[in-house]
Image (cartoon, helix red, strand yellow):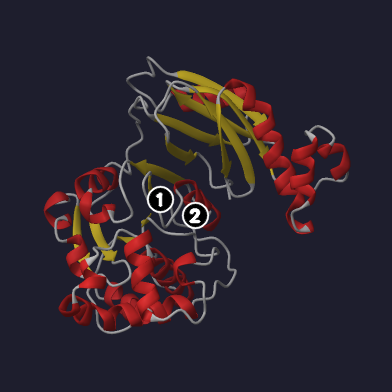
Amino acid sequence: METAALFCLPYAGGDELAYWRWADLLAGTARVHAIGREGAPSVDRVCDRIAAEDGPFAIYGHSMGARLGFEVARELRRRGAPLPVRFYVGGAHPPDVREPIARVAHIDIGEFIDQLVTRADTPAAVRDDPDIRAAVEPALAADLAWLQAYRFRPEPPLPVPIVAFAATDDHEVPRDLMLGWARHTSAWFRHHTLAAGHLFVGTHAADVTALVERSGDTGTAPPGYDEVHLWRVEPSTMDKAERLVLERYPSGTAGSRVVTAAGGGTVLVAIGPSVRAVAVERVRPIDDLDALCARLDPDERAAVLGEPEEDQVRAALQALTAHAVRAAGAVRRLDLGNAVAAIATAGAPDPVRIRYETTTGDAR
């Protein structure tokens, strides 16, 4: 990332201390501004804080902070103000997906804290120690109210690159669900998976900031033994797509398999030691759903037809991709926005870490 201000927004109940190591870790790369608490979350207050800083800037939001940062970027666009050069999101549901931890409209603060401890790696002392609980409860109550009041309103995708960070051991945000952030950018999108829990912004600060630091690099290191790199390229022939992707690995991809698939006008290239097969389909109108479902097993067809009518085409295409690769290994289904995919892997730790990137903006 070019030298810029980096505004960091905390998770529910958090404050600027969530990013206490980031200034040192990103010294010389970014000027870190960890946004503290001044009552309830406020889009306008964060926008005003950003406006006071000259020059290029980026935003990092973790968990609830990612949703707040998303609305900040949209508000800056409405104001005609400069937009971030990059938007980083960590451990966060896409904004069009309701937060499970606050989806019950009348959940009380005690239940909210219980869920944070159980699902989001919040220390048990926040729930069990009366003094600590009394200190953090006002902030948590304000954040709960903000999450419960939040309603996603459709707008055009942001013309800002989005870099998403997921975690293998995150019990609150399923790692592959974060691929849905690709729907919200008309620029490029990148998705990393860390071997960590939900609060990796603190526990794995060095790993996250290293990826932030390298997010502007044009070259890519080869996949690790427990990784699969996925590249979405469109429009392109399969041969051209594969060549384009392999050019991104200056040191080569020795030890990895390269598997390419096309479907519905989009191409997906999978690279990794464990990858065995890949299938992809662009989600598009289908005139004859029955003919599509005829290619599936009876149980698969029944599952598709059990979905709401508006979701049946997507479900059928998703089942079709999984069906296509299931003989090759352990199957992982992926929702890539306006496409669905499945990969089969063998001989790798579970879960395999996914790194996903679009090479064009047309991958929502």
Residue at mark 2: 181
Q: Residue at x 49, y 82 (%)?
A: 106
Observer-nearest residue: 120 or 285? 120
Q: Helix or strand or loop: what does disc 2 sit on?
A: helix
* Residue 173, quarter of the rendered image: bottom left
Specify whether 57 is left or right of 75.
left
Q: Is residue 305 above or below residue 32?
A: above
Q: Position of residue 355 (x, y in %)?
A: 42, 37
Residue at mark 1: 164
Specify whether 333 is left or right of 273.
right
Badge 1 crowding class, 10 Å Cα cut-off, few under 14, some 14 to 19, many 20 or more, is many
Q: Position of residue 334 (x, y in %)?
A: 56, 42
Q: Residue at x 76, y 51 (%)?
A: 312
Question: Which residue type carries mark 1?
Answer: Ala
| Residue 118 numbered tag | none
Q: Helix or strand or loop: what does disc 1 sit on?
A: strand
* Residue 90, quarter of the rendered image: bottom left
Q: Position of residue 13 (x, y in %)?
A: 28, 72
Q: Residue at x 42, y 44 (%)?
A: 191
Observer-nearest residue: 52 or 136? 136
Q: Are marks 2 and 1 in contact (CB under 8 Å)?
A: yes
**Alpha carbon distance from label 2 to label 1:** 7 Å
